Amino acid sequence: MENDLKKENSRNVFLIMAASLVLSAFFQLGSKYVAGYIELAVVGGGSLMFSSVLLMLVNIVPQSVKHKLVFTRLKNELPASRVNQLCRKDSRVEYDLVKERWPEVFSDDIDGDARNSRWYQQIYKPVKDTREVLQAHRAFLLYRDTFSGLALIFLATIVWSLIGDSKIIGEIKPVVFFIQGALMILSLIAARFSGNRFVVNAVAAAE
């Protein structure tokens, strides 16, 4: 299921990364350079090829690494490990009822890794094909992979600014770092929000 959703998202992840690269090139090289048809084709084609390579790298990066980066946790990074805390804050969930129905998930004494596993088996699997759960899952994977791709672009830009030949495109302008950093942070926030919502949506659908 997750692989199918990732395939559906691949085009959108690719286009977002390409847009980040084109915007970066526009502000780095200047509108006069990019405005010409030939130059525009070169910049656009280069961005698409680089985006293709990055998309391949994004798909190679282990899910566990992506999750640790998105949720900035080394252990129990998946939001289902904290489903008890998330459901307490969501008005759609009658917390006392779900705690009574799934005590092995919502007990405060359960380890986060065990909680995640039990949420997956007892709550998510029975409702994984419902519309609200599918939509939330798809959104989480989209923003998670988008963040991973944008982070690779940002890292590549930093590396180029340190060791690249400035004669080729000049010194990297601060606005380029701002654009790439802003897009990366926005995708990170969206990934966290959609990941948390995905977990709670499954509880709300199963309740």
Image (cartoon, grey):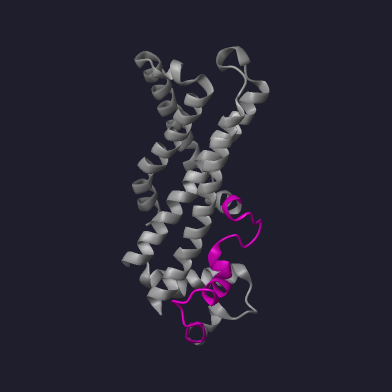
Coordinates of residue 52 in the picture (x, y in percent): 42, 32
Along the viewing direction, whichever of 100 and 175 lies nearer the viewer: 175
Up the image or down, 17 lies above or below 45; here it is below
Up the image or down, 163 lies above or below 87; here it is above
| Residue that sits furthest to the front in the current view | 32
- Magenta residues, start to end: 69-98
Residue drawn at x 51%, y 87% as measured from the top left = 100
Residue 205 magenta:
no
Along the viewing direction, whichever of 86 and 80 lies nearer the viewer: 86
| Residue that sits furthest to the top in the current view | 167
Quick check: 103 left or right of 51? right
Q: Is residue 202 visible?
A: yes
Quadrant of the image for the C terminus?
Answer: bottom left
Quadrant of the image for the N terminus?
Answer: bottom left
Q: Is residue 152 visible?
A: no
Coordinates of residue 191 in the picture (x, y in percent): 50, 54
Residue drawn at x 39%, y 37% as measured from the top left = 15
Up the image or down, 109 lies above or below 136; here it is below
